[in-house]
Image (cartoon, helix red, strand yellow):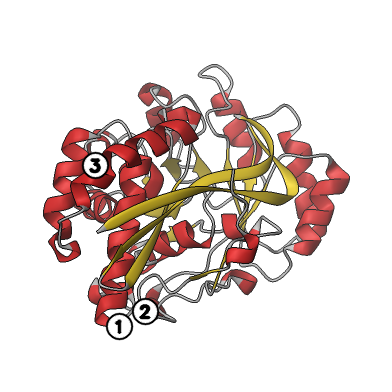
Amino acid sequence: MILTWRRARRTLKHPFETAHGRRDFQETVLVNLETHGITGVGEGCPSRLYGHTLESIEATLARIAPLLVLRDPFHIEHILDELLASYDDQRAAVAAVDMALHDWIGKRLDIPTIRWLGLDPARAPRTDITIGIDAPETIARKVREAAGFPCFKVKVGVPNELEILRTIRREAPDTPMRVDANCGWTADDAETRMRAVCEFGVELVEQPVAADDHATLRRLCALRLAPIIADESCIRPADVPKLAGVVDGVNIKLNKCGGIREARKMIYLARTVGLRVMLGCTSESSVGVAAAAQLAPLADWIDLDTHLLVTDDPFEGLGGDQGRLAIGAGPGLGVRPDATRIVQE
Protein backbone atom coordinates (compact mmCIF):
# COMPACT_ATOMS: atom_id res chain seq x y z
CA MET A 1 0.00 0.00 0.00
CA ILE A 2 1.16 3.52 -0.80
CA LEU A 3 0.20 6.15 1.77
CA THR A 4 0.21 9.83 0.77
CA TRP A 5 -1.23 12.91 2.43
CA ARG A 6 -1.84 16.61 1.99
CA ARG A 7 -3.19 19.49 4.04
CA ALA A 8 -6.57 21.00 3.29
CA ARG A 9 -8.00 24.30 4.51
CA ARG A 10 -11.69 25.13 4.39
CA THR A 11 -13.44 28.44 5.04
CA LEU A 12 -16.20 28.49 7.63
CA LYS A 13 -19.56 30.01 6.70
CA HIS A 14 -19.43 31.85 10.04
CA PRO A 15 -16.53 32.25 12.48
CA PHE A 16 -16.91 29.36 14.92
CA GLU A 17 -16.53 30.01 18.63
CA THR A 18 -16.73 27.68 21.62
CA ALA A 19 -15.54 27.98 25.22
CA HIS A 20 -12.14 26.78 23.91
CA GLY A 21 -11.69 29.63 21.40
CA ARG A 22 -12.64 31.03 18.00
CA ARG A 23 -11.59 30.17 14.44
CA ASP A 24 -12.39 31.28 10.90
CA PHE A 25 -11.29 28.17 9.01
CA GLN A 26 -10.71 24.45 9.43
CA GLU A 27 -7.46 22.65 8.61
CA THR A 28 -7.00 18.91 8.39
CA VAL A 29 -4.72 16.32 6.80
CA LEU A 30 -6.30 14.25 4.02
CA VAL A 31 -4.80 10.86 3.25
CA ASN A 32 -4.88 8.50 0.27
CA LEU A 33 -4.09 4.81 0.64
CA GLU A 34 -3.58 3.16 -2.75
CA THR A 35 -3.05 -0.43 -3.84
CA HIS A 36 -4.31 -2.60 -6.70
CA GLY A 37 -5.67 0.47 -8.46
CA ILE A 38 -8.03 1.39 -5.61
CA THR A 39 -7.62 4.42 -3.37
CA GLY A 40 -9.05 4.66 0.12
CA VAL A 41 -9.41 8.09 1.70
CA GLY A 42 -9.14 9.22 5.30
CA GLU A 43 -8.60 12.32 7.39
CA GLY A 44 -6.59 13.36 10.43
CA CYS A 45 -7.93 16.35 12.32
CA PRO A 46 -5.69 18.42 14.62
CA SER A 47 -6.81 19.27 18.14
CA ARG A 48 -4.66 21.02 20.70
CA LEU A 49 -6.79 19.43 23.43
CA TYR A 50 -5.43 16.00 22.56
CA GLY A 51 -1.92 16.93 21.41
CA HIS A 52 -2.64 16.49 17.70
CA THR A 53 -1.24 19.19 15.41
CA LEU A 54 -0.96 19.32 11.64
CA GLU A 55 2.76 18.78 12.03
CA SER A 56 2.45 15.84 14.43
CA ILE A 57 -0.15 14.15 12.22
CA GLU A 58 2.09 14.52 9.16
CA ALA A 59 5.17 13.34 11.06
CA THR A 60 3.32 10.27 12.30
CA LEU A 61 2.02 9.46 8.82
CA ALA A 62 5.59 9.72 7.53
CA ARG A 63 6.62 7.06 10.04
CA ILE A 64 3.60 4.88 9.27
CA ALA A 65 3.94 4.98 5.47
CA PRO A 66 6.93 2.58 5.17
CA LEU A 67 5.20 0.09 7.46
CA LEU A 68 2.28 -0.27 5.04
CA VAL A 69 4.13 -0.84 1.78
CA LEU A 70 3.91 -4.64 1.75
CA ARG A 71 0.75 -4.99 3.84
CA ASP A 72 -2.63 -6.37 2.80
CA PRO A 73 -5.45 -3.92 3.63
CA PHE A 74 -7.71 -6.86 4.48
CA HIS A 75 -5.42 -7.45 7.48
CA ILE A 76 -6.90 -4.29 8.98
CA GLU A 77 -7.14 -5.66 12.53
CA HIS A 78 -3.45 -6.54 12.75
CA ILE A 79 -2.39 -3.28 11.09
CA LEU A 80 -4.39 -1.11 13.48
CA ASP A 81 -3.22 -3.07 16.53
CA GLU A 82 0.38 -2.40 15.52
CA LEU A 83 -0.19 1.28 14.79
CA LEU A 84 -1.92 1.94 18.09
CA ALA A 85 0.81 0.09 19.96
CA SER A 86 3.39 2.46 18.44
CA TYR A 87 1.42 5.71 18.10
CA ASP A 88 -1.04 5.69 20.99
CA ASP A 89 -0.53 9.42 21.56
CA GLN A 90 -1.20 10.30 17.90
CA ARG A 91 -4.60 8.76 17.39
CA ALA A 92 -5.69 11.33 14.80
CA ALA A 93 -3.04 10.00 12.41
CA VAL A 94 -4.06 6.42 13.15
CA ALA A 95 -7.70 7.42 12.59
CA ALA A 96 -6.83 8.72 9.13
CA VAL A 97 -5.28 5.37 8.19
CA ASP A 98 -8.19 3.48 9.78
CA MET A 99 -10.70 5.45 7.68
CA ALA A 100 -8.71 4.88 4.50
CA LEU A 101 -8.53 1.13 5.17
CA HIS A 102 -12.28 0.93 5.77
CA ASP A 103 -12.90 2.94 2.61
CA TRP A 104 -10.50 0.80 0.55
CA ILE A 105 -12.09 -2.47 1.67
CA GLY A 106 -15.57 -1.21 0.84
CA LYS A 107 -14.44 -0.06 -2.59
CA ARG A 108 -12.64 -3.35 -3.23
CA LEU A 109 -15.79 -5.29 -2.31
CA ASP A 110 -17.93 -2.72 -4.18
CA ILE A 111 -20.22 -2.24 -1.19
CA PRO A 112 -20.70 0.56 1.35
CA THR A 113 -18.50 0.25 4.42
CA ILE A 114 -21.60 0.33 6.60
CA ARG A 115 -22.79 -2.85 4.90
CA TRP A 116 -19.66 -4.90 5.59
CA LEU A 117 -19.81 -3.62 9.16
CA GLY A 118 -23.22 -5.32 9.34
CA LEU A 119 -25.27 -2.17 9.99
CA ASP A 120 -28.49 -0.80 8.50
CA PRO A 121 -28.25 2.86 7.39
CA ALA A 122 -32.01 3.22 7.77
CA ARG A 123 -31.49 3.03 11.54
CA ALA A 124 -29.23 6.10 11.65
CA PRO A 125 -30.65 9.16 13.43
CA ARG A 126 -30.62 12.55 11.72
CA THR A 127 -27.76 14.84 12.67
CA ASP A 128 -28.18 18.02 14.64
CA ILE A 129 -26.61 21.29 13.45
CA THR A 130 -24.22 23.26 15.66
CA ILE A 131 -24.79 26.90 16.60
CA GLY A 132 -21.52 28.47 17.76
CA ILE A 133 -21.15 31.31 20.22
CA ASP A 134 -21.90 34.69 18.66
CA ALA A 135 -23.76 37.99 18.93
CA PRO A 136 -27.57 37.67 19.18
CA GLU A 137 -28.23 39.01 15.67
CA THR A 138 -25.77 36.51 14.19
CA ILE A 139 -27.25 33.69 16.26
CA ALA A 140 -30.69 34.57 14.88
CA ARG A 141 -29.36 34.43 11.32
CA LYS A 142 -27.70 31.05 11.94
CA VAL A 143 -30.96 29.66 13.29
CA ARG A 144 -32.88 30.83 10.23
CA GLU A 145 -30.25 29.27 7.95
CA ALA A 146 -30.60 25.98 9.85
CA ALA A 147 -34.37 25.72 9.42
CA GLY A 148 -35.44 22.12 8.91
CA PHE A 149 -32.79 20.48 11.06
CA PRO A 150 -34.28 18.27 13.77
CA CYS A 151 -32.21 19.75 16.59
CA PHE A 152 -29.72 22.50 17.40
CA LYS A 153 -26.52 21.81 19.30
CA VAL A 154 -25.76 25.10 21.00
CA LYS A 155 -22.33 26.09 22.27
CA VAL A 156 -22.46 27.62 25.75
CA GLY A 157 -19.91 27.99 28.53
CA VAL A 158 -19.68 31.79 28.18
CA PRO A 159 -21.23 34.64 30.21
CA ASN A 160 -23.95 35.41 27.63
CA GLU A 161 -25.10 31.80 27.21
CA LEU A 162 -28.65 32.46 28.40
CA GLU A 163 -29.01 35.32 25.92
CA ILE A 164 -27.94 32.91 23.18
CA LEU A 165 -30.57 30.38 24.25
CA ARG A 166 -33.28 33.04 24.50
CA THR A 167 -32.46 34.22 20.98
CA ILE A 168 -32.73 30.70 19.61
CA ARG A 169 -36.02 30.10 21.39
CA ARG A 170 -37.47 33.29 19.90
CA GLU A 171 -36.46 32.24 16.39
CA ALA A 172 -37.31 28.54 16.71
CA PRO A 173 -39.57 27.95 19.70
CA ASP A 174 -40.30 24.30 18.88
CA THR A 175 -36.89 23.02 17.75
CA PRO A 176 -35.17 20.81 20.35
CA MET A 177 -31.83 22.03 21.71
CA ARG A 178 -28.76 20.34 23.11
CA VAL A 179 -26.09 22.42 24.84
CA ASP A 180 -22.33 21.94 24.96
CA ALA A 181 -20.27 23.92 27.47
CA ASN A 182 -16.89 22.54 26.33
CA CYS A 183 -15.60 22.55 29.95
CA GLY A 184 -16.69 26.19 30.32
CA TRP A 185 -18.44 25.90 33.68
CA THR A 186 -16.69 25.63 37.04
CA ALA A 187 -17.34 23.34 39.97
CA ASP A 188 -18.73 26.34 41.87
CA ASP A 189 -21.17 27.65 39.26
CA ALA A 190 -22.06 24.47 37.36
CA GLU A 191 -25.25 23.60 39.22
CA THR A 192 -26.66 27.13 38.93
CA ARG A 193 -25.87 27.27 35.22
CA MET A 194 -27.22 23.78 34.68
CA ARG A 195 -30.54 24.71 36.23
CA ALA A 196 -30.68 27.90 34.16
CA VAL A 197 -30.07 26.26 30.77
CA CYS A 198 -32.47 23.43 31.59
CA GLU A 199 -35.24 26.02 31.91
CA PHE A 200 -35.11 26.05 28.10
CA GLY A 201 -36.00 22.37 27.94
CA VAL A 202 -32.66 21.15 26.59
CA GLU A 203 -32.31 17.50 25.56
CA LEU A 204 -28.85 17.07 27.08
CA VAL A 205 -25.85 18.92 28.48
CA GLU A 206 -22.44 18.04 27.07
CA GLN A 207 -19.16 18.37 28.97
CA PRO A 208 -20.21 21.08 31.42
CA VAL A 209 -16.97 21.13 33.43
CA ALA A 210 -13.30 20.22 33.15
CA ALA A 211 -12.51 16.79 31.74
CA ASP A 212 -11.02 15.46 34.98
CA ASP A 213 -13.71 16.84 37.31
CA HIS A 214 -15.63 13.61 37.73
CA ALA A 215 -17.02 14.70 41.10
CA THR A 216 -18.90 17.64 39.60
CA LEU A 217 -20.02 15.59 36.60
CA ARG A 218 -21.45 13.01 39.00
CA ARG A 219 -23.18 15.71 41.04
CA LEU A 220 -24.79 17.27 37.96
CA CYS A 221 -25.84 13.86 36.71
CA ALA A 222 -27.57 13.17 40.04
CA LEU A 223 -29.78 16.26 39.58
CA ARG A 224 -31.58 14.41 36.74
CA LEU A 225 -32.37 17.70 35.00
CA ALA A 226 -31.02 16.50 31.64
CA PRO A 227 -28.62 13.76 30.54
CA ILE A 228 -24.95 14.64 31.04
CA ILE A 229 -22.70 13.62 28.14
CA ALA A 230 -18.91 13.39 28.42
CA ASP A 231 -16.79 14.55 25.49
CA GLU A 232 -13.40 15.86 26.58
CA SER A 233 -13.52 13.33 29.46
CA CYS A 234 -13.79 10.41 27.04
CA ILE A 235 -10.97 9.97 24.53
CA ARG A 236 -10.22 6.27 24.13
CA PRO A 237 -11.79 2.90 25.01
CA ALA A 238 -10.14 2.74 28.45
CA ASP A 239 -11.97 5.93 29.47
CA VAL A 240 -15.46 4.52 28.97
CA PRO A 241 -15.77 2.23 32.03
CA LYS A 242 -14.42 4.99 34.27
CA LEU A 243 -17.42 7.15 33.36
CA ALA A 244 -20.08 4.62 34.35
CA GLY A 245 -22.06 6.18 37.19
CA VAL A 246 -20.43 9.56 36.52
CA VAL A 247 -22.35 10.66 33.40
CA ASP A 248 -25.29 9.43 31.34
CA GLY A 249 -23.47 9.05 28.04
CA VAL A 250 -20.33 9.63 26.02
CA ASN A 251 -19.51 11.52 22.83
CA ILE A 252 -17.29 9.34 20.66
CA LYS A 253 -15.18 10.94 17.91
CA LEU A 254 -12.98 9.08 15.45
CA ASN A 255 -10.12 11.56 15.58
CA LYS A 256 -10.01 11.35 19.37
CA CYS A 257 -10.04 7.59 19.65
CA GLY A 258 -8.22 6.31 16.56
CA GLY A 259 -10.85 5.60 13.93
CA ILE A 260 -13.87 3.46 13.12
CA ARG A 261 -12.58 0.32 14.81
CA GLU A 262 -11.76 2.01 18.12
CA ALA A 263 -15.04 3.96 18.05
CA ARG A 264 -16.97 0.73 17.62
CA LYS A 265 -15.18 -0.74 20.63
CA MET A 266 -16.16 2.32 22.66
CA ILE A 267 -19.79 2.03 21.62
CA TYR A 268 -19.99 -1.58 22.76
CA LEU A 269 -18.19 -0.75 26.00
CA ALA A 270 -20.61 2.11 26.63
CA ARG A 271 -23.61 -0.16 26.12
CA THR A 272 -22.09 -2.76 28.44
CA VAL A 273 -21.75 -0.27 31.31
CA GLY A 274 -25.11 1.41 30.72
CA LEU A 275 -24.02 4.59 28.95
CA ARG A 276 -25.78 6.21 26.02
CA VAL A 277 -23.86 7.15 22.87
CA MET A 278 -23.41 10.27 20.81
CA LEU A 279 -21.26 10.17 17.67
CA GLY A 280 -19.49 13.46 17.08
CA CYS A 281 -16.83 15.05 14.92
CA THR A 282 -14.12 17.66 15.37
CA SER A 283 -13.39 19.73 12.24
CA GLU A 284 -13.49 17.08 9.53
CA SER A 285 -14.58 17.42 5.94
CA SER A 286 -17.13 15.06 4.42
CA VAL A 287 -14.59 12.23 4.40
CA GLY A 288 -14.07 12.21 8.17
CA VAL A 289 -17.75 12.80 8.85
CA ALA A 290 -18.71 10.01 6.44
CA ALA A 291 -16.36 7.65 8.28
CA ALA A 292 -18.08 8.37 11.59
CA ALA A 293 -21.48 8.06 9.93
CA GLN A 294 -20.78 4.40 9.15
CA LEU A 295 -21.46 3.77 12.85
CA ALA A 296 -24.49 6.05 13.12
CA PRO A 297 -27.04 3.21 13.47
CA LEU A 298 -25.36 2.29 16.77
CA ALA A 299 -25.78 5.78 18.29
CA ASP A 300 -28.55 7.47 20.24
CA TRP A 301 -27.61 10.88 18.84
CA ILE A 302 -25.31 12.04 16.07
CA ASP A 303 -23.56 15.38 15.81
CA LEU A 304 -21.99 14.96 12.37
CA ASP A 305 -22.22 18.36 10.76
CA THR A 306 -18.80 19.98 10.35
CA HIS A 307 -18.88 19.47 6.57
CA LEU A 308 -22.04 21.59 6.54
CA LEU A 309 -20.37 24.52 8.33
CA VAL A 310 -17.90 25.35 5.52
CA THR A 311 -18.18 26.94 2.08
CA ASP A 312 -15.65 24.74 0.28
CA ASP A 313 -15.78 21.13 1.45
CA PRO A 314 -13.33 19.19 -0.76
CA PHE A 315 -15.57 16.10 -0.87
CA GLU A 316 -19.09 15.43 -2.04
CA GLY A 317 -21.68 12.69 -1.73
CA LEU A 318 -22.55 12.77 1.99
CA GLY A 319 -25.33 15.34 1.86
CA GLY A 320 -26.91 16.50 5.10
CA ASP A 321 -29.94 18.54 4.08
CA GLN A 322 -32.22 18.85 7.12
CA GLY A 323 -29.94 16.47 8.98
CA ARG A 324 -30.27 13.53 6.59
CA LEU A 325 -26.88 12.03 5.73
CA ALA A 326 -26.55 9.86 2.62
CA ILE A 327 -24.98 6.93 4.47
CA GLY A 328 -24.38 3.85 2.36
CA ALA A 329 -25.04 5.65 -0.92
CA GLY A 330 -21.85 4.38 -2.58
CA PRO A 331 -18.95 1.96 -2.14
CA GLY A 332 -16.66 2.49 0.84
CA LEU A 333 -17.35 5.68 2.75
CA GLY A 334 -19.48 6.90 -0.15
CA VAL A 335 -17.74 10.25 -0.72
CA ARG A 336 -15.86 11.53 -3.74
CA PRO A 337 -12.97 14.02 -3.56
CA ASP A 338 -13.30 17.24 -5.51
CA ALA A 339 -9.71 18.13 -6.41
CA THR A 340 -10.68 21.64 -7.55
CA ARG A 341 -11.58 22.54 -3.97
CA ILE A 342 -8.51 21.19 -2.19
CA VAL A 343 -6.17 23.93 -0.99
CA GLN A 344 -2.69 22.58 -0.40
CA GLU A 345 -0.05 24.20 1.75
Residue type at mark 3: give it: Pro
Q: In the image, 106: left or right of 152? A: left
Q: Residues within 10 Å of mark 2 (few under 14, many from 20)?
A: many
In-front residue for pair 202/328: 328
Q: Are marks 2 and 1 in contact (CB under 8 Å)?
A: yes
Q: Which mark is residue 331?
A: 2
On the image, numbered disc 3 is attached to which residue? 237
Q: Is residue 189 above or below residue 53?
A: above
Q: Mark 2 falls on what kind of element? A: loop
Q: Is residue 306 above or below residue 134?
A: below
Query: Quadrant location of the C terminus?
Result: top right
Q: Residues within 10 Å of mark 3 (few under 14, many from 20)?
A: many
Q: Position of residue 178 (x, y in %)?
A: 58, 50
Q: Residue at x 49, y 49 (%)?
A: 6
What is the quadrant of residue 212 in the picture? top left
Decide if residue 244 is in sight here: no
Q: In the image, 24: left or right of 215? A: right
Decide if residue 27 is in sight here: yes
N-terminal label among 2 and 3: 3
Q: Residue at x 41, y 31 (%)?
A: 56
N-terminal label among 2 and 1: 1
Looking at the image, which residue sits at the far top? Answer: 188
Q: Position of residue 334 (x, y in %)?
A: 43, 74
On the image, numbered disc 1 is attached to which residue? 110
